[in-house]
Image: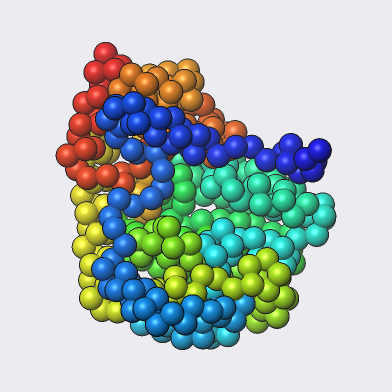
Amino acid sequence: MPSRRCADIQPFHVMELLRRARELEAAGRDIIHMEVGEPDFPTPPPVVEAATRFLATGEVHYTPALGLPRLREAIARFYRDRFGAEVPPERIIITSGASGALMLALAATTDPGDEWLLPDPGYPSNRHLVRSFEGRPVALAVNADTGYQPTSSQIAANWTPHTRGLMVASPANPTGTLLMAEALARLHDCVSERNGLLLVDEIYQGLTYGVPASTVLSNPALAASDTLFVVNSFSKYFGMTGWRLGWLVAPQSHVREIEKLAQHFFISPSTPAQHAALAAFAPGTLDLLEERRQAFAERRDILLPALRQIGFDIGTEPQGAFYIYANASALTPDSESLARRLIEEAGVALTPGLDFGEHRAREHLRIAYTTNGARLREAVDRIARCLG
């Protein structure tokens, strides 16, 4: 008999849509993938070369549970050099993907019955991870008029004696919107006044368009706070999805407890992936990543007007990540049905809003521009023909 928590965990609909896409491809259909949040660029060559050199030694053993010291130091230098943020390497915990970082942060802070406030729409795994540690996710309905980000008034209205904290993302999935420094400071103040925690997901850090990349840790007061956790990843900007490597910046007061959890959950992160990631911060790698960021910007600029011409309503233009959260209510009463129709009839895979919460979910689709410009144009043509 499965545990009771399993009954509350919903499937990741985008992965089931991907499975159907693979079935159609196996049958000879051409599918344009705009559903999964995975860059189409290969791992940067210097990262692969670093992994190859390390593997050739044959010395592939466990690292400390908190991660390779050299990599923790490299991330600290990256924060300082790129963002002017002073983050002690002792507070940086290398994890098995950003999902591992979220697990450790929640496991270290959440008791049964604790509530976490989360924006809806938002990344689906967040609410399920809260539930997995016997917490209770509380959805905050957010709309285009606030950039799909929660406000201090929402926090005040939804805070209870059981609330543990607030989770936000910048850039956000599925909307691609940002929280600027002033807004993050206000949210942190609002949470801290109530003796709560703020967890900031910066997994898409670096992928911004028209505004510079940033981190909440650039604010010295927030960086030194005992109530701030920051999650990041090598998957998105650094193009290392399959390597499953991320990191968590935690208050010093929590590091030892998180270390104990990491020892039992994971023993250590992937050793080859950690040695490979050392090359992610090399100047040549960063130059390549900036070229790729510009390519994403160009794709976004292709897709936005084309989708609007078809009839999608995009209330807030994305400034980060690689998603457009499009309102399809002028085209369909049910975005999930439309997504299934488009994959079957047009060979275009998009993600229904149902994956990201309940608030107006059936009006929206998440559309990822993780394929090249020619394929994006073809996808738009296919959608237009399918919809008549």
Classify residue 302 as left or right of residue 6. left
Whole-percent x, y for residue 348 in the image: 32, 29
Q: Is residue 325 above or below residue 155?
A: above
Whole-percent x, y for residue 62 in the image: 57, 78
Colour mapping used in the image: rainbow
Residue name at image x 25 percent, y 52 percent: 297
Q: Is residue 144 visible to the viewer in this orientation of the structure?
A: yes
Whole-percent x, y for residue 361 in the image: 53, 31
Q: For the view shown, which residue lies furthest in the top direction?
A: 388
What quarter of the picture does the N terminus occupy?
A: top right
Foreground residue among 378 and 269: 269
What quarter of the picture does the C terminus occupy?
A: top left
Residue name at image x 59 percent, y 62 percent: 100
Classify residue 45 as left or right of residue 169. left
Q: Is residue 348 visible to the viewer in this orientation of the structure?
A: no
Foreground residue among 6 and 212: 6
Residue name at image x 62 percent, y 44 percent: 140
Q: For the view shown, which residue lies furthest in the left direction?
A: 374
Q: Is residue 4 above or below residue 159?
A: above
Whole-percent x, y for residue 344 in the image: 37, 21
